Image: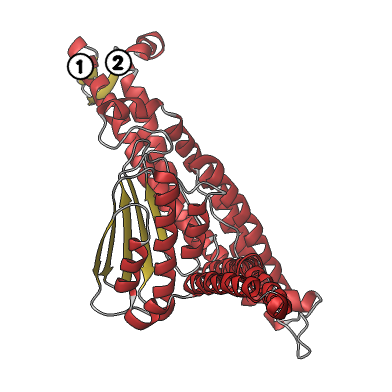
C-alpha cells in the first residue's frame, strides 16, 4: 500500500505559514523533488525506449515461436525498471509503494503450480501488474518532458533573476552591454536592465518566481506520486487480498487466545471448585454415620462452593456471549456493562435497529475492554459512553476525565483491540493527552 508524507513532509511548517514559504526555496524537500524531476527525463526515455522496442519486437515475432518469450522478457524488464522507479520515489519523494503481486504460474490439474519457462512466460503475460508497468512507461515520458522543462525554467529564471546584481558585471566585461537586453532593433535602439530601479524590479520578479517554484514543483511531483502508486504498486484486489489474509490471521489468533482464556478460567476457577466440592462431599458421606453434625457442616460448606462455582460459570458465560445481548440488544447490554464499572458511566445509545449479531458482539466486548481500562488505569471520576449509527457504520465513543496518556503502542491492550477491530474493517482512534481527558472512538461496519 502506498503511503506518503503530508503536504509539507515530516516536521514541516503548517500550510499558509509565511515563514515556511520564504524558507521553501532553500528547503531540502524542494531540491529533492527538483532532482527527481531532472532524473525523471533520462529514466523515462530509457523506460519508454526499452518498452516500445521490446514490445514491438515481440509483436513482430509473434508469427514465430519467439514472439511470446520476447514479450514475456519485455514485461519482466518493465517490472525491473518499475522497481527502480519505486526506489527513486522512495528516496527522493518519501513515497512508500509496495511491490506488486509476484508472478505465479497457475496450478495444473493435480493442484500443483506449473513450472518451467513456458509457465513463467504465460503467467507474466497474464499479469495485470506487468502490463501496468508497460503503460507507465508510455504515459510517463510526455509528463517527464513537461515536468523537466517547467522545473528547469522555473529554477533558472528564479535564481538567475534573483541574483542578477551578482552577475550583471559579466555583460560589460564580455558582451560590451550594460545588462540584460529586453528589446532592440536594427537601428541600434535597445532597452537594457541597468538602472538601480530596473535591477531591483528584476530581483523582485526573480524572488516571486522562486516563491512560486516550490508549490509548482510540488504539484508536478504529485502527479508522479499518483502514477507511481497507481501503476507500479499492487492492484487494489491484491492489496485487499493481503489485508484479508492479515485479518484472517488476526481473527484466528484472537479465537485461539479466547479459547486459551476460557480453558484457563475453567481450569483455575469452576473446575477447581467442582473438584474440591466432590472431595468435600465424599468426606461428608464418610462422616455421615460417625459424626452427622460434622457431615452437615461439610455439606453446608459444599453448598456455598456450589453457589460460587455457579457464579463463576455465569461470569464465564457472560464473557463468552452475554444472554442479555442476545435477548435485548446492544443498548441494555451496554447499560448492564456500565453498571458493573467502578467509575460512574453515563450511557447514551441511539440505534434505529440492531446491527448484525457479530458486530453487536464485537461492539460489546470493545466497550467492555475500554471500561475495564478506565476502572484499572485511568483514575477517572466520571466516564461517558455514546453509541450511534452514522450511515453504514456503528460508532462507539468512550470518554473519561482521568489522567490520560493512553496510546496504541505495541504491546498495549489498546493495540490488540485496534487489531481486532481492523480484522472486521473497523477503526480505533485514541485521543488521550497527558492529564486527560481521554476519548476513544471505535468505528465498526453495520453489517
Q: Residue at left 51%, top 46%?
A: 409
Q: Residue at x 54, y 54 (%)?
A: 97
Q: Could you say which disc has been placed on residue 198 in the image?
A: 1
Relative horizontal placement of residue 324, taking residue 411 as reference (left or right): left
Q: Secondary structure at mark 2?
A: loop
Mark 1, mark 2: which one is toward the viewer? 1
Name the spot of residue 367 as percent of width and height, x first: 39, 62
- Does label 1 or label 2 sit earlier along the sequence? 2
Q: How many marks?
A: 2
In the image as oriented, which residue stretches furthest toward the right? 116
Q: Position of residue 191 (x, y in %)?
A: 21, 20
Residue occupied by mark 2: 179
**Left or right of 248 in this view: 229:** left
Which quarter shows the C terminus? bottom left
Q: Nearer the viewer, residue 230 or 406?
A: 406
Cβ atoms at labels 1 and 2 below 8 Å apart: yes
Q: Nearer the viewer, residue 111 or 194?
A: 111
Q: Residue at x 42, y 36 (%)?
A: 152
Amino acid at each position: 500500500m502506498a503511503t506518503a508524507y503530508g503536504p509539507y513532509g515530516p516536521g514541516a511548517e503548517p500550510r499558509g505559514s509565511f515563514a515556511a514559504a520564504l524558507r521553501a526555496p532553500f528547503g531540502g524537500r524542494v531540491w529533492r523533488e527538483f532532482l527527481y524531476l531532472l532524473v525523471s527525463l533520462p529514466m523515462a526515455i530509457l523506460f519508454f525506449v526499452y518498452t516500445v522496442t521490446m514490445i514491438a519486437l515481440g509483436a513482430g515475432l509473434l508469427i514465430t515461436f519467439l514472439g511470446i518469450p520476447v514479450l514475456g522478457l519485455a514485461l519482466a524488464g518493465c517490472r525491473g525498471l518499475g522497481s527502480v522507479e519505486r526506489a527513486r520515489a522512495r528516496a527522493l519523494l518519501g513515497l512508500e509503494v509496495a511491490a506488486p503481486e509476484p508472478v505465479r504460474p497457475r496450478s495444473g490439474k493435480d493442484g500443483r503450480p506449473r513450472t518451467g519457462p513456458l509457465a513463467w512466460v504465460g503467467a507474466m503475460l497474464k499479469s495485470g501488474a506487468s502490463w501496468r508497468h508497460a503503460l507507465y512507461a508510455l504515459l510517463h515520458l510526455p509528463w517527464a518532458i513537461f515536468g523537466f522543462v517547467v522545473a528547469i525554467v522555473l529554477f533558472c529564471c528564479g535564481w538567475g533573476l534573483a541574483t542578477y546584481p551578482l552577475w550583471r558585471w559579466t555583460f560589460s566585461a564580455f558582451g560590451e552591454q550594460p545588462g540584460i537586453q529586453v528589446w532592440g532593433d536594427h537601428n541600434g535602439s535597445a532597452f537594457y536592465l541597468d538602472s538601480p530601479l530596473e535591477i531591483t524590479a528584476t530581483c523582485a520578479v526573480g524572488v516571486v518566481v522562486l516563491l512560486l517554484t516550490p508549490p509548482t514543483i510540488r504539484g508536478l511531483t504529485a502527479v508522479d506520486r499518483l502514477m507511481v502508486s497507481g501503476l507500479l504498486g499492487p492492484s487494489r484486489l491484491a492489496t485487499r487480498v493481503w489485508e484479508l489474509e492479515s485479518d484472517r490471521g488476526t481473527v484466528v489468533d484472537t479465537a485461539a487466545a479466547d479459547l486459551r482464556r476460557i480453558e484457563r478460567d475453567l481450569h483455575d476457577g469452576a473446575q477447581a471448585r467442582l473438584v474440591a466440592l466432590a472431595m468435600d462431599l465424599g468426606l461428608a458421606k464418610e462422616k455421615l454415620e460417625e459424626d452427622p453434625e460434622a457431615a452437615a457442616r461439610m455439606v453446608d460448606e459444599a453448598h456455598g462452593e456450589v453457589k460460587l462455582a455457579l457464579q463463576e460459570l455465569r461470569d464465564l458465560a457472560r464473557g463468552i456471549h452475554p444472554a442479555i445481548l442476545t435477548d435485548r440488544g446492544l443498548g441494555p447490554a451496554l447499560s448492564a456493562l456500565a453498571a458493573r464499572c467502578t467509575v460512574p458511566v453515563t450511557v447514551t445509545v441511539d440505534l434505529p435497529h440492531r446491527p448484525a449479531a457479530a458486530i453487536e458482539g464485537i461492539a460489546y466486548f470493545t466497550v467492555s475492554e475500554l471500561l475495564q481500562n478506565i476502572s484499572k488505569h485511568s483514575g477517572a471520576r466520571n466516564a461517558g459512553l455514546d453509541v450511534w449509527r452514522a450511515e453504514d457504520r456503528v460508532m462507539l465513543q468512550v470518554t473519561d476525565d482521568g489522567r490520560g496518556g493512553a496510546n496504541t503502542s505495541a504491546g498495549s491492550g489498546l493495540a490488540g483491540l485496534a487489531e481486532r477491530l481492523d480484522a472486521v474493517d473497523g477503526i480505533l482512534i485514541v485521543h488521550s493527552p497527558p492529564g486527560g481527558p481521554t476519548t476513544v472512538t471505535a468505528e465498526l461496519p453495520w453489517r
